């Protein structure tokens, strides 16, 4: 009798679908994955139901890849269910790893988000000011929706996570390496981020173009300047999160002549990616004059969204700015 293949599950929480796409993007390599494992749950692609997972023995799934942040009660419930049924859980992508782009909503809360989305955007036509209810009755039937939380959480806020596959979405090579390491039982210590522990700058072809003393007098946005495709973005006055970001993505944005926005998250030595970048940034401002520093910093459009684009829910800021807004 042939040996049973390891069972694998994929699930999405508060996610854009890009991480699901990253599995499909394995192209012909997905056939090797499918040949090596049994996919037992993948709601976006296969018709398995929650009750199928509930019926599986605990720890019978070798590994669950869960993408997206945790923003609703249903996602928390599914994360706990998959944790119980799985030997390993991998936080797949920046949203599960750090909270990601949906985590920027942590600058607001449920009420302000619902008011904006369902009532006040220019394209909203909702004279009854109706917002989703957890329970409603239609034609005598009670309908329920999951609870929408005030706060987006990274996956490891709600369950124990074994490994983190970083990136928005993770590079295909990182996914292949992770699957291979799991199949061969050659995994690093629990809690590891499955990508090189060095900064984007260390792998960047433009690193040599940084002047010995890098200074910035003025911040420009990428569309405001004709970008030199060979030169370090910071040396061109354009914010690039490379110094505070982990490598392993193939420097995809930089190859496309766009600065790094930080989706791989920080390296192991860095606790807070935004704070790390701010400290690097402060050291290259070409002035000690407070007013001039204020002027330069005031030209950064949306500083919190720039420095914490992918990591707000995991940062030291967390919801402090929301508290200030309240
Ligand atoms: S990490 Fe990026 S691609 Fe993946 S779900 Fe989040 S926003 Fe989408
Ligand atoms: S700051 Fe950006 S462009 Fe400059 S070396 Fe680092 S990653 Fe490359
Ligand atoms: S260059 Fe930066 S933002 Fe772009 S994919 Fe790599 S880590 Fe993510």
Image (tube, rainbow, N blue to C red):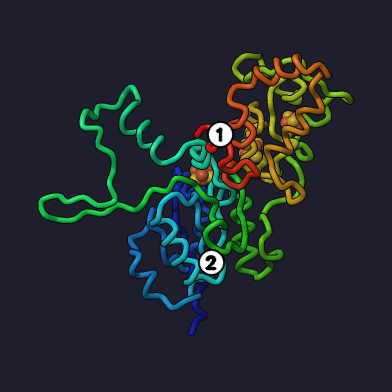
Secondary structure under tag 1 reads: helix
Marks 2/1: CA distance? 40 Å
Residue position for label 2:
63
Image location of residue 293, percent across then percent down: 75, 19
Q: Secondary structure at mark 2?
A: strand
Residue 324: give its label.
1
Q: Nearer the viewer, mark 2 or mark 1?
A: 1
Residue 37 in the image: state x and y as whole percent: 50, 67
Q: Residue furthest right?
A: 212
Q: Position of residue 30 (x, y in %)?
A: 51, 56
Q: Position of residue 71 (x, y in %)?
A: 45, 49
Q: Residue at x 34, y 53 (%)?
A: 146
Is 212 or 123 nearer to us in this picture?
123
Query: Measuring 44% from the left and 52% from the top, which residue is drawn there?
Result: 13
- Is residue 47 at least partly visible in the picture? yes
Compared with residue 194, is residue 236 higher up or lower down, i.e. above or below?
above
Which one is nearer the viewer's eye here, 116 or 92? Answer: 116
- The residue furthest left is 139
Identified at 37% across, 31% down, the residue is 116
Does the rendering let one see residue 205? Answer: no
Quarter assignment of residue 169? top right
For residue 25, which numbered disc appears in the image? none
Mark 2 closeness class: few <14, some 14–19, many ≥20 residues within 10 Å: many
């Amino acid at each position: 009798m042939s040996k049973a293949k390891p069972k694998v599950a994929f699930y999405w929480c508060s996610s854009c679908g890009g991480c699901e796409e990253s599995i499909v993007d394995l192209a012909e390599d997905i056939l090797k994955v499918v040949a090596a494992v049994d996919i037992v749950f993948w709601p976006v692609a296969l018709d398995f139901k929650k009750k199928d997972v509930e019926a599986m023995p605990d720890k019978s799934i070798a590994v669950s890849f869960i993408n997206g942040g945790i923003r609703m009660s249903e996602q928390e419930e599914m994360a706990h269910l998959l944790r119980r049924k799985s030997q390993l859980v991998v936080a797949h992508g920046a949203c599960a790893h750090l909270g990601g782009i949906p985590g920027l909503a942590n600058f607001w809360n449920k009420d302000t988000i619902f008011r904006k989305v369902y009532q006040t955007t220019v394209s909203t036509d909702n004279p009854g000011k109706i917002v989703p209810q957890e329970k409603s009755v239609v034609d005598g039937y009670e309908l329920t929706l999951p609870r929408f939380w005030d706060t987006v959480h990274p996956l490891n806020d709600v369950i124990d996570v074994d490994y983190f596959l970083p990136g928005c979405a993770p590079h295909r090579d990182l996914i292949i390496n992770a699957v291979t390491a799991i199949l061969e039982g050659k995994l690093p210590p629990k809690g590891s981020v499955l990508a090189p522990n060095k900064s984007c700058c260390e792998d960047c072809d433009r690193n040599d173009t940084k002047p010995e003393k890098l200074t910035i007098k003025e911040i420009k946005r990428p569309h405001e300047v004709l970008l030199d495709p060979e030169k370090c973005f910071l040396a061109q006055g354009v914010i690039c999160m490379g110094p505070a970001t982990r490598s392993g993505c193939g420097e995809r944005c930089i190859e496309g002549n766009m600065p790094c926005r930080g989706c791989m998250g920080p390296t192991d030595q860095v606790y807070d990616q935004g704070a790390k970048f701010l400290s690097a940034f402060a050291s290259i401002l070409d002035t000690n004059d407070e007013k001039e520093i204020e002027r330069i910093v005031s030209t950064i459009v949306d500083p919190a969204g720039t420095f914490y684009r992918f990591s707000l829910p995991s940062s030291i800021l967390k919801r402090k700015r929301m508290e200030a807004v309240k």
